[in-house]
Image (cartoon, helix red, strand yellow):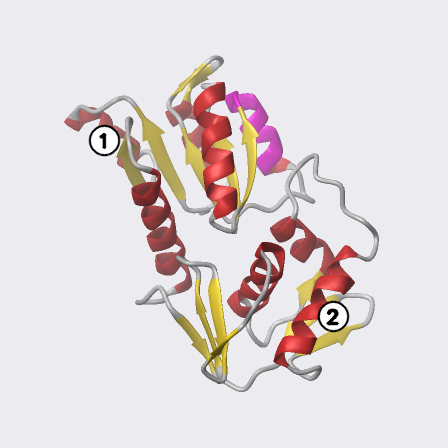
Amino acid sequence: MRILLVEDDQALAEALVRGLQRGGDVVDWVSRGKEALLALQTPQEYFDLMILDLGLPDGDGLDVLRQVRKTGNAMPTLILTARDSLDDRVSGLDAGADDYLVKPFELAELQARLRALTRRQQGRSSEEWRIGALRLDPSQCRAWWQDSEIDMNRREFMLLKALAERHTQVVTRSRLEEQLYGWGEEVESNSLEVHVHHLRKKLGKEAIRTIRGVGYRLEIAG
């Protein structure tokens, strides 16, 4: 998934970006509330989830969250902050947060909470996904086809997961590139096609259909 991280502590933010990327996520980082709002208001940008600090240099993260919710944006949001009082937690949740985690924290717990938010949004009850003969475990970045584990790199898994999330739907090329690459990452013109080609070799060429001029669709019988 693609995550917007709003955190002014550079050391913590860089550690989070590295840790979440190792887990198969794309993370874009901003350090100020205004930057977060600008990113969320940019039409060509799409994020699955936001991690939001409250003590930002240009204001309170709760104000950012309230503005986001006023626009009708229901993107799952986890508040990550040092504010640990009951009143702070209640205020955060009442402002529209979906979860609240206090610093210091363990990366594994943060990742588990993010996966739970994603499951809740997608209406899934378990972490593991099954679509016909395809099985995915996002918590471990592993997938199986006809009970045999698929050998794939991180971006191939991210692509397969993005297609599986919208099974039977056409996913545009731009949306898939956003799921695979963050800000500042160089994207070669044929990178997406190369990843699709590799997945087809592992799943069968009929598993992913090209919709010319639009994108791709996962065509595995559920």
Residue count near mark 1 (Cα–Cα under 10 Å), binned few <14, some 14–19, many ≥20: some
- Residue 135 lies in what quarter of the image? bottom left
Can the viewer see residue 86 in this picture? yes
Residue beneath the point at 33% across and 54% down = 116
Q: Which residues are magenta?
A: 31-40
Residue beneath the point at 40% across and 55% down = 118
Distance from Cα at disc 2 to Cα at disc 1 = 47 Å
Compared to 73, does 145 lie above or below?
Answer: below
Residue extending farthest to the left is 86
Is 105 in front, or is 89? 105
Residue under circle 2? 197
Compared to 146, does 90 lie above or below?
Answer: above
Is 155 in front, or is 151? 151
Question: At numbered mark 1, what does the secondary structure look like: helix, strand or loop?
Answer: helix
Q: Residue 89, labelled with which disc?
A: 1
Q: Is residue 165 left or right of residue 85?
A: right
Q: Between disc 2 and disc 1, whose residue precedes?
A: 1
Q: Position of residue 220 (x, y in %)?
A: 57, 83
Residue extending farthest to the top is 57
Residue 136 within the segment the image draws in magenta = no
Q: Position of residue 201 (x, y in %)?
A: 69, 77
Q: Is residue 128 left or right of residue 183?
A: left
Q: Position of residue 108 (x, y in %)?
A: 33, 44
Residue beneath the point at 51% across and 35% down = 17
Q: Position of residue 176 (x, y in %)?
A: 66, 57
